[in-house]
Image: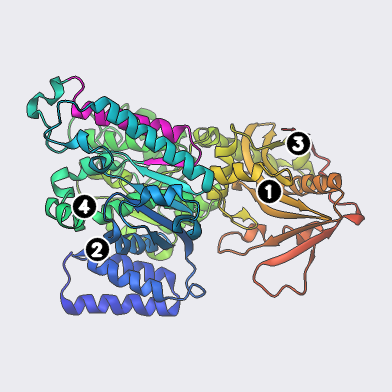
């Protein structure tokens, strides 16, 4: 929207007032309104400078350090990246190398890049900078473009290897766009190989490099430019004048693409998609049209709703939990699932269903409690602006996604933000719906048991501790990035950082797998500890919300106690770093006999356990398996 000067001034004052008051919810709302104005970059600049001046103590943002390396001028993205990051609860701290200096920064161990100690590094390269001959309109006869592409792939491999030797940070590398105008024009596709073929081969090599390296990922820059349109993306004049080829208007889109990775890296990937039904999963109101009269089928608009359901099912296949919050008659909804043959989604695709006449915010609260997930891991989708507004104000932690008026735009609205994008996909992700069904069966058993101990014994748990290896490192890193509730320190680790810790023989780095009578829950926990002299220090101890309340955490501490005893240590130390979400872990050490350190005046509560008392014992109602590396 375009705001007049007075309205814009009011919006800026509201944002600044919320920021000064430390009201992150209201500041985020105001920032979102500001960033909907035109031009966006002017608002982004205002937000960026206000956030830079704000006190980290008053504003609970997650800090993430990002280094930008590029073959062109990319400095103009700073405002957009920091402002858009603020909407996701991130304080983005930037290191900007001079354009064209990416080789020196990566290869020199003493460069500013490594001194900055980034969490993530973006390597933004334009194909014409890396392989100039491939993008020329007048290729010399002697030029061997195949050889040039092979050499470019070799250089990317060398840079990736050099970076990984020097840093465990996450590395994001742009892939390459084909030339906007091909040298042979309409005959490009008939050449062998064509320019497009050679760029595709380079992108294939880049994909291989990323697959074979831990913590290195491809930014689909080519796809982003294609979706936007190359003629709208590039500014030929600024490319020649200032080596700044991307139009100012396209920079926020590039920033949003980076933020998909940064959200995943900082534990802000969403877990649960909650859907309305009428005019969302199908057209019309089922209570009026009937189960067979709703718009759903091969003709428009029914086919648009089928496309949307397929997109939703695709998210479920990626491990996203699906739920329903609908104001409807339950019998009508059940009849749609039972009898309408055009439904792509099935009733058992949904792990939680709330159909009735309560406020949508109440339904979402009940869904969050049932699934044992935090509201900030939920995305709510509805076509009704009033319902979206009610949820947004009652549950500000929930991400609300209002659908556009036309159903053919629903898929884009759902997928474009990348709320559910993750840096890895584990077996547990693919089985998530099944795992939640197992959890529900366990909760039914709890309700039928005479006591907690009776429940634990009837559950027939088997807990396996295993060293992190190549087969489990992705899941271990993913858990550090996503687990917030039962997590004593909430330290985030990349795959490379987890593997780096494994190389130290004084480190304990293990995954925790839990099986019970209802099936295999998969890897649900991670613990890391370091032994030094007479002490063992717990660095990370986390547990998936699916198995909280089953004494698995006691078994984890018993395993650390056993490890410490084997080393001859006399004391275990741990700390609790309080966050807005990890309340379930706050009393972990206290209820297991650790003593607090009265001299510690910091917010990070320090605890210690004297092993001369015998340490911590494994619960008697579970079988414990300890695998060796």
Q: CA distance from mark 3 to mark 4?
A: 62 Å
Whichever of callouts 3 and 4 sits on the residue coming sooner in the sequence is 4
Of mark 1 and mark 2, the one earlier in the sequence is 2
Does any portion of residue 354 appear in the rendered image?
no
- Marks 2 and 1: in contact by CB < 8 Å? no
Find residue 458 and name its label: 3
> What kind of element bears circle 2?
loop
Query: What scheme was used to colour the molecule?
Result: rainbow
Q: Visible in this render: residue 530?
A: yes
Dividing the picture into quadrants, the one containing residue 93 is: bottom left
Residue holding disc 2: 36
The answer to the question of whether label 3 and label 2 lie on touching residues, with beta carbons closer than 8 A, is no
Q: Front-most of 623 and 49?
A: 49
Mark 3 or mark 1: which is in front?
1
Query: Magenta includes 530?
Result: no
Q: Which residues are magenta?
A: 192-218
Looking at the rendered image, the quarter that the C terminus falls into is top right
Residue at horizontal 72%, vertical 54%?
538
- The answer to which of marks 3 and 2 sits earlier in the sequence is 2
Of pointers 4 and 2, the one earlier in the residue sequence? 2
Q: Which residue is mark 4?
A: 246
- Which of label 3 and label 2 is nearer to you? 2
Residue 479, position as x, y percentages in the image: 57, 45
Residue under numbered circle 1: 528
Q: Distance from label 4 to label 2 (Cα)?
A: 21 Å
| Residue at 68%, 48% in the rendered image | 528
Q: Is residue 221 above or below residue 488?
A: above
């Amino acid at each position: 929207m375009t705001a007049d000067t007075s309205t814009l001034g009011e919006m800026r004052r509201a944002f600044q007032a919320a920021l000064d008051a430390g009201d992150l919810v209201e500041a985020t709302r105001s920032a979102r309104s500001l960033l909907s104005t035109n031009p966006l970059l002017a608002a982004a600049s205002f937000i960026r400078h206000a956030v830079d001046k704000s006190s980290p103590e008053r504003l609970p943002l997650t800090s993430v350090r990002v280094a930008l390396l590029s073959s062109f001028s990319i400095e103009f993205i700073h405002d957009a990246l920091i402002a858009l990051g603020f909407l996701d609860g991130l304080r983005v701290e930037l290191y900007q190398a001079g354009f064209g200096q990416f080789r020196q920064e990566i290869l020199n161990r003493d460069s500013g890049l490594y001194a900055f100690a980034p969490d993530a590094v973006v390597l933004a390269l334009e194909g014409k900078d890396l392989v100039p001959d491939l993008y020329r309109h007048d290729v010399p006869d002697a030029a061997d473009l195949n050889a040039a592409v092979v050499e470019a792939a070799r250089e990317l491999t060398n840079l990736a290897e050099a970076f990984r030797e020097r840093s465990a940070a996450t590395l994001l590398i742009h892939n390459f766009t084909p030339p906007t105008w091909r040298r042979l024009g309409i005959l490009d596709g008939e050449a062998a190989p064509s320019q497009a073929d050679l760029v595709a081969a380079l992108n294939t090599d880049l994909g291989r490099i990323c697959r074979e390296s831990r913590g290195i990922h491809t930014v689909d820059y080519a796809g982003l430019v294609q979706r936007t349109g190359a003629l709208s993306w590039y500014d030929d004049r600024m490319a020649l004048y200032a080596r700044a080829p991307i139009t100012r208007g396209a920079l926020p889109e590039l920033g949003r693409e980076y933020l998909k990775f940064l959200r995943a890296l900082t534990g802000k990937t969403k877990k649960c998609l909650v859907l309305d039904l009428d005019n969302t999963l199908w057209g019309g109101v089922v209570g009026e049209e009937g189960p067979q009269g709703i718009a759903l089928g091969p003709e428009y608009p029914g086919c648009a709703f089928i496309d949307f359901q397929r997109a939703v099912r695709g998210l479920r296949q990626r491990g996203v939990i699906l739920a329903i919050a609908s104001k409807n008659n339950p019998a009508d909804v059940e009849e749609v699932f039972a009898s309408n043959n055009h439904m792509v989604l099935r009733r058992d695709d949904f792990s939680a269903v709330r159909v009735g006449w309560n406020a949508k915010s109440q339904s979402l609260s009940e869904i969050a409690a049932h699934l044992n997930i935090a509201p900030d891991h939920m995305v709510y989708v509805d076509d009704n602006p009033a319902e979206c507004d009610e949820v947004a104000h009652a549950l500000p932690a929930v991400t609300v996604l209002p659908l556009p008026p036309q159903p053919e735009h629903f898929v884009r609205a759902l997928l474009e933000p990348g709320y559910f994008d993750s840096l890895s996909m584990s077996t547990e992700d693919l089985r998530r719906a099944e795992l939640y069904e197992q959890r529900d069966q366990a909760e039914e058993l709890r309700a039928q048991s005479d006591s907690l101990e009776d429940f634990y014994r009837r559950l027939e748990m088997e807990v396996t501790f295993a060293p992190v290896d190549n087969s489990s490192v992705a899941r271990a890193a993913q858990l550090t990035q996503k687990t917030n509730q039962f997590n004593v320190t909430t330290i985030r680790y990349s795959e490379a950082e987890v593997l780096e810790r494994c190389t130290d023989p004084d480190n304990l780095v293990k995954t925790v797998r839990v099986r019970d009578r209802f099936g295999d829950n998969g890897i649900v926990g991670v613990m890391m500890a370091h032994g030094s002299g007479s002490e063992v220090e717990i660095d990370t101890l986390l547990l998936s919300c699916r198995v909280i309340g089953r004494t698995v955490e006691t078994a984890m501490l018993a395993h650390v106690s056993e490890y410490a005893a084997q080393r001859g240590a006399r004391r275990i130390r741990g700390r609790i770093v309080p966050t807005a979400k990890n309340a379930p872990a706050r009393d972990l050490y206290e209820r297991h006999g650790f003593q607090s350190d009265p001299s510690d005046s910091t917010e990070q509560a320090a605890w210690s356990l004297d092993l001369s008392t015998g340490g911590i014992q494994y619960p008697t109602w579970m079988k414990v398996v300890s695998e060796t590396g």
